[in-house]
């Protein structure tokens, strides 16, 4: 094993790549919080396969996504750039959105394709559909796609079945738009989607993709952004009623079951030791769903906020024989996945301003992370306010704080939407190693050391903001009902006739 690692390192050192490029599986959960997995301390979650990844891989304690909501977080994951650069702000894209992730942005799939990778995306895209499906995954470097191209609550769900035999989805979801479609590449296969069959379809699509790629001796990149555990929770017959945690627990268990199927396929096809699996989540838990929603563990608030609960996520890197099992407190982010995969595949980085750093030294050699800072933008970033918070080393400074609708209902009065925007000058500073819950701001008076730290933070903030060129907002381009995916485009009256 030691020998393998040394060889791998020598390889990286000499040619900047592995002898045979590794396969990549990128798993991205939805609205899953820091406290939701068994391997992150949840007492009743049922996640045996994610726990297996955690115990056999590297588990991060200080890993961040870039936004407390979906679309911007996904844009950063796939491009290695803050969402402000690509224009995926404010908020999220809708079924009829005119904009999407600009086609001149370079995704991880587009980075890997020139190295001969087979690429597939399965699940929740949420980076745009657009006119003639121009923003779908097959136009962003993915050979194949199966999934719902946005959140599965972005269509009426009141009469849809979320659990067997016929338990209706909880709540109404979004009304006045088309029901959610299941798309294969750019073709609608089913509308509304059948939630009871969905995970099975995703799992089969994914395992077939792996098997086919291995047969063709092609390295592969599978991107699986799951709908689990976003509202409304659902699960098919294999997972429903299996956890002690109710609908949320069953939804999470269904996702975990697919992780198990992927692991079994990697073992059967003999590529498990040449595959890096990376797991994380898009943003913090939707606390407004109360006990049906996720949990941020000991972190403050959740989805929609720039507190830790909104953006610090569980994350696991699993690669038997190459990544030694353990826990790391090093700082890392979804931004770093593109440069890391590029390095491991020997691929060229896009010639743009990247915000990610290469984590191979940390993953393979357990070295230091090259990441020293993390930027926290709100759901509606603007040049006027700039960043809301900045983490430098173990310290985090909040320049603005605000609650969010998504984080309502917990006893902490800083979390719900009623906690209006508050400016902090000087910023609130927390030591996240001593106080991860952001309970006790450090007093600056009589602490010249902290004054010095604040000077450094202000310098890093100024440098970062000087480097930030806001891309044109794609979401402010608005929506058009004709762009909502409809399986029966000439039918009337819309949206209810879009039903196949
Ligand atoms: C993409 O094109 C837009 C519009 O021309 C431009 O402003 C932006 O900088 C380009 N982005 C990249 C990554 O090249
Ligand atoms: C759902 O079912 C109810 C009762 O059957 C019906 O009145 C309503 O129109 C349906 N709603 C949708 C969105 O299909
Ligand atoms: C993967 O490596 C482990 C040792 O790290 C070994 O026990 C196992 O047999 C290998 N599996 C395959 C499929 O090569």
Image: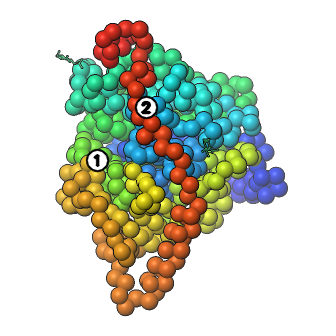
Vertical side of 82 occupied by 20: above or below: above
Which residue in the structure is indicated by mark 2? 97
Assign a secondary structure to mark 1: helix
Q: Residue at x 43, y 31 (%)?
A: 97
Does any atom of ligand 2 lie closer than 8 Å to the CB of label 1? no
Q: Nearer the viewer, mark 2 or mark 1?
A: 2
Mark 2 Cα shell of 10 Å, populated few (<14), some (14-19), many (≥20): many
Assign a secondary structure to mark 2: loop
Vertical side of 197 occupied by 126: above or below: below
Q: Is residue 34 visible?
A: no
Of residues 264 and 500, the one drawn nearer to the viewer in this rendering: 500
Residue 444 position, x and y percent, is 37, 84
Tell me if 396 is positioned left or right of 178 in this view: right
Q: Residue at x 34, y 82 (%)?
A: 443
Residue 40 position, x and y percent, is 39, 54
Q: Is residue 87 visible?
A: yes
Q: Earlier in the sequence, mark 2 or mark 1?
A: 2
> Quick one: quadrant of the C terminus?
top left
Label number found at residue 406: 1
* Quarter residue 491 falls in: top left
Label number found at residue 434: none
Of residues 345 and 449, the one drawn nearer to the viewer in this rendering: 449
Residue 165 position, x and y percent, is 26, 20
């Amino acid at each position: 094993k030691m020998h393998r690692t040394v060889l791998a390192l020598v390889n990286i050192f000499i040619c900047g790549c592995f002898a045979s490029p590794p396969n990549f599986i990128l798993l991205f959960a939805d609205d899953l919080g820091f406290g939701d997995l068994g391997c992150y301390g949840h007492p009743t979650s049922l996640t045996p396969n994610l726990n297996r990844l955690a115990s056999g891989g590297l588990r991060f304690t200080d890993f961040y996504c870039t936004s407390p909501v979906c679309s911007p977080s996904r844009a950063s994951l796939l491009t290695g750039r803050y969402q402000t650069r690509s224009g995926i702000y404010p908020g999220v894209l809708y079924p009829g959105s005119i904009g999407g992730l600009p086609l001149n942005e370079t995704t991880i799939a587009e980075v890997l394709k020139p190295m001969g990778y087979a690429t597939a995306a399965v699940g929740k895209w949420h980076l745009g559909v657009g006119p003639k499906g121009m923003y779908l995954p097959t136009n962003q470097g993915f050979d194949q796609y199966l999934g719902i191209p946005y959140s599965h609550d972005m269509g009426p769900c009141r009469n849809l079945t979320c659990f067997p035999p016929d338990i209706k989805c909880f709540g109404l979801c979004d009304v006045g738009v088309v029901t959610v479609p299941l798309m294969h590449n750019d073709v609608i296969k089913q509308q509304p989607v059948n939630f009871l069959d969905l995970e099975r379809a995703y799992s089969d699509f994914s395992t077939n993709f792996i098997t086919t790629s291995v047969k063709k001796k092609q390295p592969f990149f599978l991107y699986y952004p799951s709908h689990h555990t976003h509202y409304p929770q659902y699960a098919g017959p294999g997972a429903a009623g299996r956890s002690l945690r109710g609908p949320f627990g069953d939804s999470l268990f269904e996702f975990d079951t697919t992780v198990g199927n992927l692991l079994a396929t990697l073992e059967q096809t003999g590529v498990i030791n040449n595959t890096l699996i990376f797991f994380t989540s898009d943003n913090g838990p939707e606390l407004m769903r109360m006990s049906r929603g996720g949990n941020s563990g000991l972190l403050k608030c959740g989805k929609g906020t720039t507190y830790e609960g909104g953006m610090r996520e569980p994350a696991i890197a699993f690669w038997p024989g190459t990544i030694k099992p353990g826990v790391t407190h090093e700082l890392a982010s979804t931004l770093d996945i593109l440069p890391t995969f590029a390095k491991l595949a020997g691929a060229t980085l896009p010639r743009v301003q990247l915000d990610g750093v290469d984590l191979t030294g940390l993953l393979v050699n357990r070295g230091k992370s090259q990441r020293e800072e993390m930027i926290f933008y709100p759901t509606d970033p603007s040049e006027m306010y700039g960043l809301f918070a900045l983490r430098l080393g173990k310290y985090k400074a909040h320049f603005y704080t605000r609650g969010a609708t998504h984080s309502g209902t917990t006893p902490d009065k800083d979390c719900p939407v009623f906690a209006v925007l508050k400016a902090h000058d000087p910023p609130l500073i927390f030591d996240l190693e001593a106080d991860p819950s952001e309970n006790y701001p450090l007093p600056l008076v009589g602490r010249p050391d902290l004054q010095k730290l604040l000077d450094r933070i202000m310098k890093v903030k100024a440098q970062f903001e000087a480097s930030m060129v806001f891309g044109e907002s794609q979401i402010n381009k608005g929506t058009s009902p004709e762009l909502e995916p409809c399986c029966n485009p000439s039918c009337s009256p819309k949206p209810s006739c879009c039903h196949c």
